[in-house]
């Protein structure tokens, strides 16, 4: 395989990866809009279409990674890049699945219920935090920016704290109260949404760690630092 062919294969891989990144960010935007209007069927339709795109791109990129490894015996630096693409692609596809789960939960959640004003306010803050983490981590990876990647890793602690705060909030607000069906559904769905938002923060962190691996050649997963 010629050098030109190798460059072309990596270019195709990069193009598909960038398309996947833009699609997951578009899905984040859909969720943002649904928080404002849970009755918009067009937004739910857009979310389902985005998920199909993400699934197909994940499969396509995986095949391109395998092809690149077996066909042109990449150098160490190229191999790190290809492996990083695979790791990040897996995490982005996972974020897409998580977003769709949250979007499905919104269909049966009354976000305007007066008893859940505090939970809704915290949900908005947590969504904004995870949205910022995803945008930063994608920028860090595509720009090979380790400094920005480390910022994302630190921000995961903030998202984790919000997740635990919700549990305390639900106990404080609803302990020893008789709950109706709508309140119970809301409690279950809010816990589910917060759990899934926390998982998005984890995936953003995984992408940031892949960026560090790509830029510094260090695997910092599962390390206290």
Image: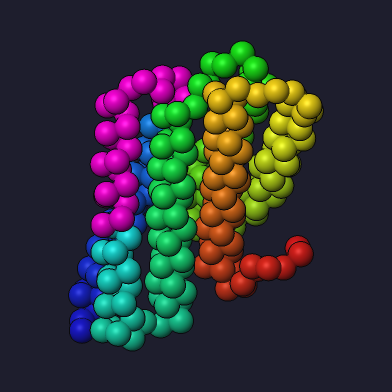
Residue 179 x/y as whole percent = 65, 24
* Colour convention of the picture: rainbow
Quadrant for the C terminus in the image: bottom right
| Residue at screen point 56% across, 68% down | 213
Left or right position of 158 against 72: right
Q: Is residue 127 visible?
A: no
Residue 117 x/y as whole percent = 64, 18
Magenta segment, principal secondary structure? helix
| Residue at screen point 72% across, 37% down | 167
Left or right position of 140 against 16: right
State the image quarter where residue 88 is shown: bottom left
Is 35 located above or below residue 219 in the figure?
A: above
Q: Is residue 4 visible?
A: yes
Residue 36 falls within the magenta-colored stretch: yes
Q: Which residues are magenta?
A: 32-56
User: How many badges with numbers are in the image?
Assistant: 0
| Residue at screen point 70% across, 23% down | 178
Residue 78 x/y as whole percent = 41, 75
Residue 136 falls within the magenta-colored stretch: no
Q: Nearer the viewer, residue 85 or 75?
A: 85
State the image quarter where residue 69 is shown: bottom left
Quadrant for the N terminus in the image: bottom left
Left or right position of 24 against 187: left
Is 11 located above or below residue 162 in the figure?
A: below
State the image quarter where residue 192 is shown: top right
| Residue at screen point 45% across, 29% down | 108
Residue 79 x/y as whole percent = 42, 77
Q: Nearer the viewer, residue 187 or 19?
A: 187
Task: Identify the residue at the far top of this view.
Answer: 114
């Amino acid at each position: 395989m010629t050098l030109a062919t190798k460059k072309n294969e990596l270019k195709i891989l990069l193009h598909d990866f960038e398309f996947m990144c833009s699609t997951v960010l578009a899905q984040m935007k859909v969720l943002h809009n649904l928080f404002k209007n849970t009755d918009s069927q067009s937004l739910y339709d857009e979310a389902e279409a985005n998920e199909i795109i993400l699934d197909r791109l994940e499969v396509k990129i995986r095949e391109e990674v395998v092809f690149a490894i077996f066909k042109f015996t990449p150098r160490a630096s190229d191999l790190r890049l290809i492996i990083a693409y695979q790791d990040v692609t897996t995490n982005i596809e996972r974020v897409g699945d998580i977003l769709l789960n949250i979007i499905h939960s919104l269909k049966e959640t009354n976000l305007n219920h007066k008893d859940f004003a505090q939970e809704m306010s915290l949900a908005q803050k947590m969504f904004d935090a995870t949205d910022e983490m995803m945008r930063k981590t994608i920028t860090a990876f595509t720009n090979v920016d380790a400094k920005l990647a480390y910022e994302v890793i630190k921000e995961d602690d903030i998202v984790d704290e919000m997740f635990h705060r919700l549990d305390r909030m639900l106990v404080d607000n609803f302990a020893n109260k008789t709950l109706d069906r709508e309140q119970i559904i809301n409690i279950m769905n809010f816990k589910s949404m917060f759990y899934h938002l926390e998982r998005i923060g984890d995936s953003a962190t995984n992408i940031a760690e892949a960026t560090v691996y790509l830029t510094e050649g260090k695997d910092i997963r599962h390390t206290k630092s």
